[in-house]
Image: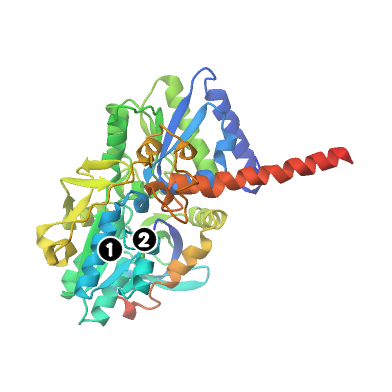
Amino acid sequence: MKYVDDFRDPALIRQAAAEIRALADPSRRYRLMEVCGGHTHAIYRFALADLLPPNIELIHGPGCPVCVLPMGRLDDGLAVAEEHGAIFTTFGDVMRVPGRRGSPLERKSKGVDVRMVYSPLDALRIATREPDRHVIFFAIGFETTAPSTALTVLRARALGVTNFSVFCNHVTILPAVRAILESPDMRLDGFIGPGHVSTVIGCQPFSFVAREHRRPLVTSGFEPLDLLQAIVMILRQLRAGRADVENQYARVVPWDGNRAALRAIAEVFELRPYFEWRGLGFISQSALQIRDAYAGWDTERRFVVPGVRVADPKAAQCGEVLKGVLKPHECKLFGCECTPERPIGALMVSSEGACAAHYNYARRQESRREPVAVTLADTAAT
Amino acid sequence: MCLAIPGQIVERSPDHPDLATVEVSRVRRVINVALLADEPLQPGDWVLIHVGFAMSLISEDAAREQLRLLAMLGEDEEAMRELDGLPATSADTP
């Protein structure tokens, strides 16, 4: 309960925690998955598991876009940039992601023209300022960032900028959730639905989770109280034998999403037949590619892409952790061979990955508890 | 990339209907508001910004909560760096 007094509305937090304890049937276990990497970060940062009874377990899902990006895609993007002397642009989150021949940051030090951008429009701006160079925007993210990439492609076409292309790695969250639900070792009781992704797609597309798989899904905000309230809402459904999609984050997430954003995505992108996810393998119709009408701004059609595949190391058990079969520290490589400094598996790559979050926060919490115990013992002795 | 940064609209430009000037913690930046074309955005409104694009219209209370949340998550400095990376005037945007 260390953080509770720092939170907004500590009384409401305690009330929500008490309600969770009252709703949870002590004779059963609850495994709830938060789909979004931002939620994973918040859950660890605020040590929310400490507020839950021991029979409620939070499983950290596939919603960290950097984590699920196959290493081969990064190698491909960098190889094209290097071969054609192009400028490789991407978000800061990608800069330290290891590729087989180094991260974008390391490749920059070896002479590849790698530049970090805060918006895809920055990449387009570089292309307009340096018309003699080709600029690749290495696009990554779920539905939260896909509309921005789509609008940037539309802008490039409107301006007639031809020295700009997008290496598209956008993925969509629904097929990943479906893949987890259809996995033979699936053992989840409910879902905390993503916040920012849902501002784009809305809550309605998650209805298959409730209808076909009979699991509750509650879209949640990122504050401690939001997440606890979402858990209350899931437990109420489970107790009543209901499975519905509900929206705890209605102050930001419209039920039907953002129509302009969905129109932009639909105009520029179509579904790929299949795409590889680190830790989950190939999932059909789970990623976006650029439509024929915009092929001129598609790196993969402007240039020959090597098509590198880098298999996840067999010893890394990312898939089991993603599906909640194993906890992060139960993986054989956790904290030894696989650390945030030298990640081997997908979930150690970004601070929003389950294993990196566990490594950064859960371990620190352990060390924080010890000095407290010493202080208490000292007090008792004096 | 996954950060949602709250900003207050301070200026709309009739010449650039897709752009707006926002202010966050006294820093002014130009963002793209095309994804909120369906909303009648006015100066004074608060929006959540992802990678330079306003994605949702939110209340002032929700914006203040989000700023506080970013600080609690230790992501406020990253958010300000991200904001600094955006253009300061609409002339800089392609």
Q: Residue at x 30, y 57 (%)?
A: A140
Q: Amino acid at mark 1?
A: Phe
Residue placed most toward the observer, A358 or A162:
A358
Colour theme: rainbow
Looking at the figure, which quarter contains the N terminus of chain A? top right
Quarter of the image where one finds residue B51: bottom left
Percent coordinates x, y for residue A65 in the rendering? 34, 51
Q: Which residue is denoted by mark 2 in the rendering?
A: A94
| Marks 2 and 1 share the same chain | yes
Q: Which residue is denoted by mark 1 in the rendering?
A: A138
Helix, strand or loop under label 2: helix
Percent coordinates x, y for residue A289 in the rendering? 18, 54
Q: Tell me if residue A17 comes above or below residue A95 in the rendering.
A: above
Q: Residue at x 60, y 48 (%)?
A: A364
Q: Tell me if residue A211 comes above or below residue B64 in the rendering.
A: above
Q: Earlier in the sequence, mark 2 or mark 1?
A: 2
Q: Amino acid at mark 2?
A: Val
Q: Is residue A138 left or right of residue A320?
A: left
Q: Is residue A260 left or right of residue A3?
A: left
Looking at the figure, which quarter contains the C terminus of chain A? top right
Percent coordinates x, y for residue A106 in the rendering? 38, 68
Q: Which mark is residue A82?
A: none
Q: Residue at x 57, y 42 (%)?
A: A47
